[in-house]
Image (cartoon, rainbow, N blue to C red):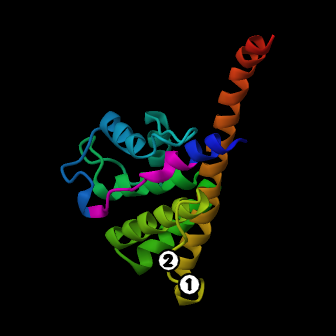
């Protein structure tokens, strides 16, 4: 991979920031609006996409509560943000276990905001934008430690997906480059 490609990959994460709990929609969103809202925040990462059928399956499996009058609340949107970020590195069963542990120890707002801070720091570090500026592991409680251990591989997966997407784009250009050389 050339330097320009590596720069483009880093740029895809440069402005990555998730809204904090209080910034999530407070009035509830319909399914299509919820899907669009979540996808908007992960749009620069290839392979990260939420669909309506995925949300329906998460509700059926009990990962997130049923919508109230067909609307999804802040809590549910926060859960979906986490699920979409880690679903490729954790089983649904383990995600559900982590949610149940989290519910015993903190509020949805605290859990979600901690997730946001950890994911943003991990993405910044993995994409080479900044150092990992979070408290050391030995200062974390068990729940925070588990969260971090799910976030770090998720950030690496985001990075690798960006790398492979960039390689596919470069490879698609190869025939044109070879034609120009001949």
SS under mark 1: loop
Residue at mark 2:
134
Q: Secondary structure at mark 2?
A: loop
| Residue hosting label 1 | 136
Circles 2 and 1: CB atoms closer than 8 Å: yes
Q: CA distance from mark 2 to mark 1?
A: 6 Å
**Residue stretch in magenta:** 10-21
> Relative to 124, does residue 32 appear above or below in the rendering?
above
Question: Relative to 19, does residue 30 appear above or below in the rendering?
Answer: above
Observer-nearest residue: 47 or 31?
A: 47
| Rendered residue at 34%/73% (across/down) | 107
Query: What residue is shown at x 31% (from left), y 62% (from top)?
Result: 20
Give the x, y percent position of residue 116.
42, 63
Residue drawn at 38 percent across, 77 percent down: 106
**In terms of depth relative to the viewer, which is nearer, 138 or 2?**
2
- Give the residue furthest to the front: 181
- Residue 18 lies in the magenta stretch: yes
Q: Which residue, as the protein is rendered here, is positioned at the far right?
A: 182
Using the rendered image of the protein, determine whether residue 6 is visible from the camera's viewpoint: yes
- Name, please, the residue furthest toward the bottom: 139
């Amino acid at each position: 991979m050339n330097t320009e490609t590596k720069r483009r990959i880093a740029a895809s994460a440069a402005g990555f920031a998730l809204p904090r709990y209080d910034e999530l929609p407070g009035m509830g969103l319909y399914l299509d609006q919820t899907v669009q809202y979540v996808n908007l925040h992960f749009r620069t990462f290839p392979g990260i996409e939420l669909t309506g059928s995925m949300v329906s399956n998460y509700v059926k499996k009990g990962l997130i509560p049923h919508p109230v009058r067909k609307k999804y609340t802040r809590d549910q949107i926060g859960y979906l943000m986490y699920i979409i970020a880690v679903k490729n590195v954790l089983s649904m069963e383990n995600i559900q276990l982590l949610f149940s542990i989290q519910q015993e120890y903190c509020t949805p707002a605290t859990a979600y905001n901690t997730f946001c801070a950890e994911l943003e720091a991990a993405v910044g570090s993995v994409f080479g934008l900044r150092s990992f500026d979070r408290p050391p592991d030995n200062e974390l409680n068990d729940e925070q430690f588990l969260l971090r251990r799910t976030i770090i591989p998720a950030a690496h997966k985001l990075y690798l997906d960006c790398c492979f997407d960039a390689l596919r784009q470069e490879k698609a250009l190869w025939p044109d480059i070879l034609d120009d050389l001949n």
